[in-house]
């Protein structure tokens, strides 16, 4: 019996997991399984800033030029692709539907599981920050300084100021960031209440330009936020918006991702540090920096947290680094990779 257990453990540790890696210039997704390239899913549209999300056993992909695709993750096969807009920026799920926010036209589109359009909501604005919350969904209207909460066909409108441009959902709180204003807005979805909040440290307001919230590393009610124009990240309590701590970095941060055990934070950079990745041990404050490739586009921890996946755009490679040593474990050729998504 013991040899079988040892064999099982060996197999479990030896084989990798499935990843979908966006091939930004080819309108395709590379399929990486057991640490090797096993296939490709093509004809997905313009995949600049593409997002992949899992729902009800399938993967859904939104393209910048307005195509929403449904993918069979077992066969790695495109099942259906529909045009939902000319420029789409995000999507999410509610109980039995997919909701898509469009820049152009000025609409939010609701589709069923088979990607048939159920409803189109005309807003008169570019729409961003769409998030599903049970049977309801929330999104921001950039050109109207409003946030709309839609539930059972009813629309509740919240007035905000500063041009909302991105958002995240933390429990029942919808947090919206602004292009022309510091701080964030917070909507309590259950209480239907809006308030404008500032980041504070030791009782004083902290003003910094908030980037796209998709670059934040969010863990429960805490976030690691990349600063803009500063070589540091902020550790923030999302309930109080108190700055808990700051960490100095060797470059200007872009994406921040948090390991499953919440001990490590990985960061990539823009500018002269775009080829580098840093791994921060938040418990000890220790930073490990490695040159990871030519223009690092995205980062993702493995499910067990033992590896950090890195997409190197100009190298055309997906690379896997051991955590916490940051030793290169393997690399796989992928044409101009950007976003990395785990398929579980």
Image (cartoon, rainbow, N blue to C red):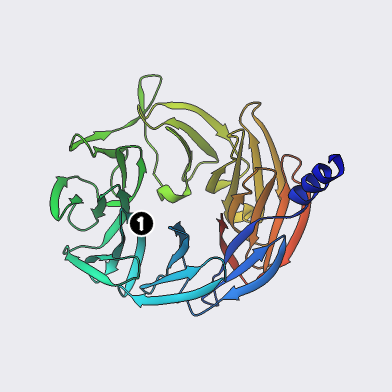
Q: Which residue is mark 1?
A: 92
Residue at 26% in and 53% down: 139
The residue lying at 42 percent from left, 32 percent from top is 221
Classify 255 as above or below 48.
above
The quadrant in which residue 9 appears is top right
In front: 286, or 14? 14
Seen from this angle, which residue lies furthest top? 202
Q: Nearer the viewer, residue 308 or 38?
A: 38
Measuring from the top left, give residue 143's x and y in whole percent.
21, 58
Going 44% across and 50% down the picture, which residue do you hit?
Answer: 214
User: Farthest residue toward the front?
Assistant: 1
Which quarter of the figure has residue 104?
A: bottom left
Image check: 293 left or right of 265?
right
Q: Dot 1: within a 10 Å radius of its alpha carbon, few (fewer than 14), some, or many (20 or more) residues?
A: many
Q: Is residue 210 left or right of residue 267?
A: left
Of the pair 331 and 154, the residue shown nearer to us:
154
**Farthest residue in the bottom direction?**
43
* Residue 293 visible in this rendered orientation of the protein: no
Image coords of residue 14 (percent x, y): 78, 52
Q: Is residue 58 above or below residue 87?
A: above
Q: Is residue 146 left or right of residue 68?
A: left
Residue 105, percent across and down? 24, 71
Residue 219 visible in image: yes
Count of marks, rendered view: 1
Q: Position of residue 92 (x, y in %)?
A: 35, 56
- The answer to whether residue 180 is above or below residue 57 is above
- Residue projecting furthest to the right: 3
Tag 1 secondary structure: strand
Q: Quadrant location of the C terminus?
A: bottom right
State the quadrant of the N terminus.
Answer: top right
């Amino acid at each position: 019996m013991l040899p079988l257990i040892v064999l099982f453990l060996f197999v479990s540790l030896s084989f990798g997991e499935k990843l979908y890696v966006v091939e930004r210039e080819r309108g395709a997704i590379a399929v990486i399984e057991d640490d090797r390239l096993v296939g490709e899913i093509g004809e997905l549209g313009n995949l600049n800033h593409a997002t992949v999300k899992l729902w009800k056993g399938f993967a859904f992909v939104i393209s910048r030029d307005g195509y929403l695709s449904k993918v069979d993750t077992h066969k790695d096969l495109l099942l259906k692709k529909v045009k939902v807009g000319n420029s789409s920026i995000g999507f999410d799920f509610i109980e039995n539907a997919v909701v898509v926010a469009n820049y152009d036209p000025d609409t939010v589109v609701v589709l069923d599981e088979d990607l048939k359009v159920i409803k189109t909501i005309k807003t008169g604005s570019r729409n961003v920050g769409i998030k599903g919350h049970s049977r309801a969904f929330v999104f921001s209207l950039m050109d109207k300084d409003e946030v709309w909460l839609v539930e059972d066909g009813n629309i509740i409108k919240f007035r905000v100021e500063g041009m909302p441009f991105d958002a995240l959902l933390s429990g029942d709180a919808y947090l919206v960031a602004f292009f022309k204003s510091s701080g964030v807005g917070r909507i309590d979805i259950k209480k239907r209440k809006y308030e404008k909040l500032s980041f504070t440290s030791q009782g004083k307001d902290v003003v910094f330009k908030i980037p796209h919230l998709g670059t934040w590393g969010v863990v429960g009610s805490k976030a690691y936020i990349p600063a803009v124009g500063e070589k540091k990240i902020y550790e923030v309590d999302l309930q109080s918006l108190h700055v808990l701590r700051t960490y100095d970095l060797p470059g200007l941060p872009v994406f921040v991702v948090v390991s499953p055990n919440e001990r490590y934070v990985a960061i990539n950079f823009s500018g002269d540090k775009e080829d580098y990745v840093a791994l921060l041990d938040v418990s000890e404050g220790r930073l490990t920096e490695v040159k990871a490739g030519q223009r690092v586009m995205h980062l993702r921890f493995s499910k067990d947290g033992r590896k950090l996946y890195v997409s190197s755009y100009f190298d055309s490679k997906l690379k896997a680094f051991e955590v916490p040593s940051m030793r290169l474990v393997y690399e796989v050729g992928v044409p101009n990779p950007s976003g990395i998504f785990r398929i579980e």
